[in-house]
Amino acid sequence: MEPAEYLAALRKHWLVILLLSVLGFGAGYAYSTSLPSSFRATSSVYVTVPQSSSVGELVQGSTYAQNRIENYAQLATKPYVLDPVIERLGLDTTGRSLAKSVSVSAPLNSTILEIAAVSGDPQRSADIANAVARQLATAVEELEGDTSDGDPNVQITLVGEATPPSFAFAPNTKLNAATGLVLGGIAGVVLALARTLLDTRIRSMRDLRRVTATPVLSSVRYDRKNRRDPLVIRRDPFGDQAEAFRRLRTNLRFLTIEGPSRSIVVTSSLPTEGKSTAAINLAIAMAEGNARILLVDADLRRPSVHRYLGIEGAVGLTTVLIGEATAEEVIQPWGDGSLDVLPAGQIPPNPSELLDSPAMARLLQRLSLRYDVILLDSAPLLPVTDAAVLSRLTDGALVVVGCRAVHRNQLADALASLEAVDARVLGLLLNQVSAKASGSILTYGSTPQATARAWSLPGRPNRRGARADGSAARPGAPTAPAQPPVAPVPAARTEDVPQPRPVVLASADERLLPGRELSGLDDLELPEPRPHVQERGAHASWL
């Protein structure tokens, strides 16, 4: 992953990071409040030897005290010192337990001992520290003995009496809460990066490039409205989704496909990737020109084209393949007539065998003589082999990749299944792309509906005060000079317009498109172009 991808992962999971940080802060604060308060009181004692008359004896005594200071620090936490303290203060504990709450430290090169006592009561902690200091002095005098003059060899003096502390030193609520906040944030960052690294679902074009170098012909943005009305070109013909399918149509148009016809299988790796709706919208986009398009519902396991288009689906492809009807009898026109639909028909018990039968190959060969483009909506690649079978009978396959629906390894396996049968992958359609991944939505121009509403509102005043219904302007306003009447153009007579001559077909029962399967085109007399040809759609023809 690149640094930008790490930042994108953290930005994507910022809510998780924030939530875990808040939870860590709350956990640290709750842990601190659950602990009992502890108070620490400290007393200080000074270790000396009896004074001597000479300087050498003083230095020798000081050195002796420093050498013995560590022994005295350890002695302060022994039962020899603590048991009398427990008896004097009346504590309900033992010497071993009290030793855990008493600590003695000796600064370097010093003869001073710091005795600290910890307790839940501030007064008791001070009493314990002072009692241990006094009892330590008594124990040292007993252990070290006296001099010949009756003075102790080592004398310990209480120089700093412990006082009850004002504040508890533990628990440190601020430190624990801050630690919980930091640990929660770290856990959130680790979780965000782990989810990004372990999530192999395809979400954007960058994820797709990691799987294959197959060209992506177009990408369609995700929209919740597609669930209710998936025909985006019909619902919003000037939206960005409709333009995405027109872009797909244009890219497929410039692909080099051998042969006089173009037959394309539309499939996907898994269900719910939007292959059927993509095939329908692509067929509608292709039919906007003068080309003749045939949409075949070749998904004989879960057919859905007839349901989306609102046509009869009881008879169709399976009826033709088993010989109970001809293709002409079951093909249904849709829209303005430039798009024909062959539904799937009844669900057979052997879909793969029917699609791989010689009857299917003959049907496709015959239909290719009548239509410019044949689109076949097929089953997914991974669950069944129907799409791989059909891809060998057509010019190639268009694989629909649903964002957040398919994993990278699943797409790789689907493309490998097509490669195993020596099928051609024409390209990929990245479907259901999120608005963030697809970038900004760019539009250009106005819709005809909006333009018509803007110019057909009756009684709408203009800048000069004139009305759209033809009423006079305000007095004194300048008027435009009258235009001379335009003479009407005489209508052309029917006999003056050259009529096209019918093209002689190869046989009486097969109507071919002009120029298909014909030889001797140099000697063929073509009719003059008809004037005022009305196009079927607002976009360029497929051919």
Image (cartoon, rainbow, N blue to C red):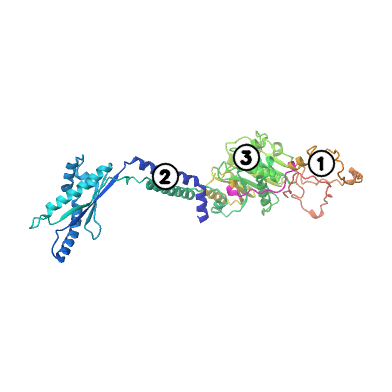
Q: Is residue 442 magenta?
A: yes
- Considering the numbered disc 3 on the image, is that residue within a helix, a strand or a loop? helix
Q: Position of residue 467 (x, y in %)?
A: 82, 39
Amino acid type at image mark 3 = Asn
**For the residues carrying marks 1 and 3, which lies nearer the camera in this image?**
1
**How dense is the environment of label 2, judged by Cα within 10 Å: few (below 14), some, or many (20 and up)?**
many
Which of discs 2 and 1 lies nearer the camera? The answer is: 1
First-in-chain label (1 vs 3): 3
**Residue 314, image x, y percentages:** 65, 33
**Which percent across, then down, holds residue 29?**
39, 43
Q: Main secondary structure of the magenta part?
A: loop
Q: Residues within 10 Å of mark 1 (few under 14, many from 20)?
A: few
Residue at image mark 2? 25
- Mark 2 and mark 3: span between their CA atoms? 43 Å
Q: From the viewer's perspective, tell me whether residue 134 is left or right of residue 266.
A: left
Please tell me which residue lies in front, 2 or 474. 474
User: Which residue position holds label 1?
Assistant: 465
Measuring 17% from the left and 64% from the top, which residue is drawn there? Answer: 59
Identify the amino acid type marked 2.
Answer: Phe
Q: Which residue is mark 3?
A: 226
Element carrying mark 2? helix
Q: Which residues are magenta?
A: 436-449
